[in-house]
Image (cartoon, rainbow, N blue to C red):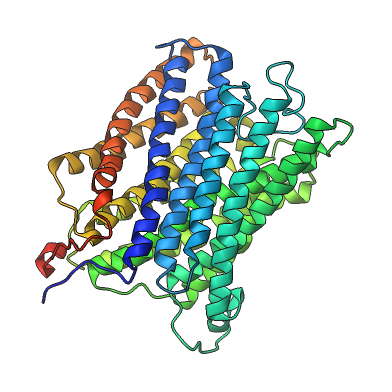
């Protein structure tokens, strides 16, 4: 029997997600190049001014999360549209607002010298010691607000569509099934994950909007003050939740695509539903593990942040990683670029969580949190986990459209990307172990060698990523055409 890799997504939706996917992937590539510049400077292979270093550091952190979120949102929209009716105008509005916000952020950094990092901790935007003025802070904070509005519209629309189809968000999270009631129709994992992401990101974006607007007011009216600890809590609640949601959006593709390759359905069983419900709650309230060194924080919040950080890394990760292993085991799956990226993303998620849980331990956090250990875990989690999901989605789009003919260059680029990303993150973790601080433009001699090794790895990662992005960019004009690529069962199963 002939098997064709296809889905129920209409051509119009497929064309609609091409641009945000390409834009997100292209910006990820650009942020990698900026990260390489920072490593080269820290490794004393090039020399840039401290002021320029902190400007591109601000862009790197802000841009990488924004780009990943844009591509992740495209993945979520693409697959969720098979189950609920979504308004394509909202996706377009999100992209337009994203572009406007990006331009504002670039103006703030490169025209008005804003360099307060993505954290923009109060009162730093308004009190810069002369490094930037009102215009720089306003463009950055305003740009972030515009981007946030676009994403808020996006998640309000996904929530509206889910509620219209399933009655309420509780039903879409499987509460009736958890409590023993029979649901009218089977609940797809995509709907469960999309509901979770919509809930946590609406919460995050409201928190972010609150502190951004208050900070803008403070820039123009210094007599309007904010409690610094409250501002930091709002910033990290926003940033931590929003950044982590990228992998929760990306994993939707894993739930949808691996069953197509194995011929085995991915069911939303009770344990699966409980895990996603736990993660919905935990993701919102674990951000205090970023504030363990803030002695003014209420102790109970720090304890909750530490304990639930351990718990949050397990439920969804375990059921997803275990589910991926079980769905693939003895399935005769064909390992092409799509399936390989999606499977290895599970590995990246697992290993990326381990140093994060280590860092969430208070005794270790006091020593390691302000070192490169944290970028090590985050790059591992995002680079091998979330970005692998995005790149897998790129190759999946090519497959569904019938445009994918893999070459040895693709396969070589895959292995270069995975192996050298492990090397890059390993150099970060080692730097953290020996005490190299993060967010320093200059490093002591004993910290330089890992930076140089990391820079060498980064060069090859960038080359591999360029291959992935170009593959979609060069074929994007054919999307929506009648091109199809017939694939037999032997093509999909070994």
Residue name at image x 58 percent, y 51 percent: 150
* Residue 33, horizontal then vertical, whole percent: 40, 27
Q: Quadrant of residue 280?
A: bottom right
Residue name at image x 64 percent, y 56 percent: 284
Figure disc tally: 0
Residue name at image x 37 percent, y 45 percent: 22
* Residue 421, horizontal then vertical, whole percent: 35, 36
On the question of residue 295 being in view, the answer is no
Q: Is residue 486 left or right of residue 395?
A: left
Location of the C terminus by quadrant is bottom left
Location of the N terminus by quadrant is bottom left
Residue at the right extreme? 223
Q: Is residue 120 left or right of residue 49?
A: right
* Residue 308, horizontal then vertical, whole percent: 63, 55
Viewer-side residue, 162 vs 230: 162
13 in relation to 211, above or below: below
* Residue 224, horizontal then vertical, whole percent: 87, 36
Residue name at image x 38 percent, y 39 percent: 26
Viewer-side residue, 470 vs 283: 470
Q: Quadrant of residue 333?
A: bottom left
269 in relation to 9, above or below: below
Q: Is residue 17 left or right of residue 48?
A: left
On the question of residue 388 being in view, the answer is yes
20 in relation to 365, above or below: below
Q: Is residue 479 left or right of residue 202?
A: left
Q: Quadrant of residue 251?
A: bottom left
């Amino acid at each position: 029997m002939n098997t064709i890799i296809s889905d129920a997504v209409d051509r119009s939706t497929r064309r609609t997600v091409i641009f945000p996917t390409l834009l997100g992937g292209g910006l990820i590539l650009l942020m990698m190049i900026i990260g390489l510049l920072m490593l080269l400077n820290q490794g004393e292979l090039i020399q840039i001014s401290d002021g320029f270093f902190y400007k591109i550091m601000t862009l790197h952190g802000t841009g990488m999360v924004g780009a990943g979120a844009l591509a992740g949102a495209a993945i979520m929209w693409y697959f969720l549209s098979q189950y609920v009716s979504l308004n394509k105008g909202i996706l377009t509005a999100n992209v337009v607002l994203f572009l406007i916000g990006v331009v504002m952020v670039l103006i703030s950094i490169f025209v008005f010298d804003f360099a307060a990092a993505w954290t923009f901790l109060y009162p730093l935007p308004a009190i810069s010691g002369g490094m930037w003025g009102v215009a720089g802070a306003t463009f950055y904070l305003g740009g972030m607000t515009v981007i946030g509005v676009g994403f808020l519209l996006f998640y309000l629309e996904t929530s509206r569509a889910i509620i219209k189809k399933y009655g309420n968000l509780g039903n879409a999270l499987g509460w009736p099934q958890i409590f023993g009631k029979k649901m009218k129709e089977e609940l797809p994992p995509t709907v469960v994950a999309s509901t979770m992401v919509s809930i946590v990101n609406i919460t995050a974006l409201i928190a972010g909007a609150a502190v951004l607007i208050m900070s803008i007011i403070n820039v123009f009216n210094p007599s309007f003050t904010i409690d610094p600890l409250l501002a930091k809590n709002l910033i990290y609640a926003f940033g931590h939740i929003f950044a982590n949601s990228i992998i929760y959006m990306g994993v939707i593709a894993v739930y949808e695509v691996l069953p197509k390759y194995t011929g085995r359905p991915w069911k939303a069983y009770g344990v699966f539903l409980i895990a996603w419900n736990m993660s919905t709650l935990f993701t919102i309230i674990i951000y205090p593990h970023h504030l363990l060194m803030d002695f003014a924080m209420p102790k109970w919040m720090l304890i909750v942040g530490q304990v639930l950080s351990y718990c949050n890394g397990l439920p969804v990760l375990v059921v997803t990683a275990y589910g991926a292993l079980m769905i693939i085991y003895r399935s005769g799956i064909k390992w092409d670029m799509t399936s390989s990226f999606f499977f290895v993303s599970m590995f990246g998620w697992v290993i990326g969580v381990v140093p994060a849980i280590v860092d969430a331990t208070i005794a270790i956090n006091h020593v390691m949190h302000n070192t490169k250990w944290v970028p090590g875990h985050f790059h591992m989690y995002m680079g091998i986990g979330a970005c692998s999901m995005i790149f897998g989605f790129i190759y999946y789009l090519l497959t569904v459209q019938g445009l994918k003919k893999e070459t040895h260059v693709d396969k070589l680029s895959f292995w270069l990307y995975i192996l050298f990303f492990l090397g890059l993150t390993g150099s970060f973790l080692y730097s953290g172990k020996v005490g190299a601080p993060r967010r320093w433009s200059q490093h002591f001699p004993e910290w330089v060698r890992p930076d140089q090794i990391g820079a060498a790895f980064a060069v090859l990662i960038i080359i591999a990523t360029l291959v992935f992005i170009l593959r979609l960019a060069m074929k994007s004009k054919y999307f929506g055409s009648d091109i199809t690529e017939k694939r037999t069962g032997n093509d999909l199963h070994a």
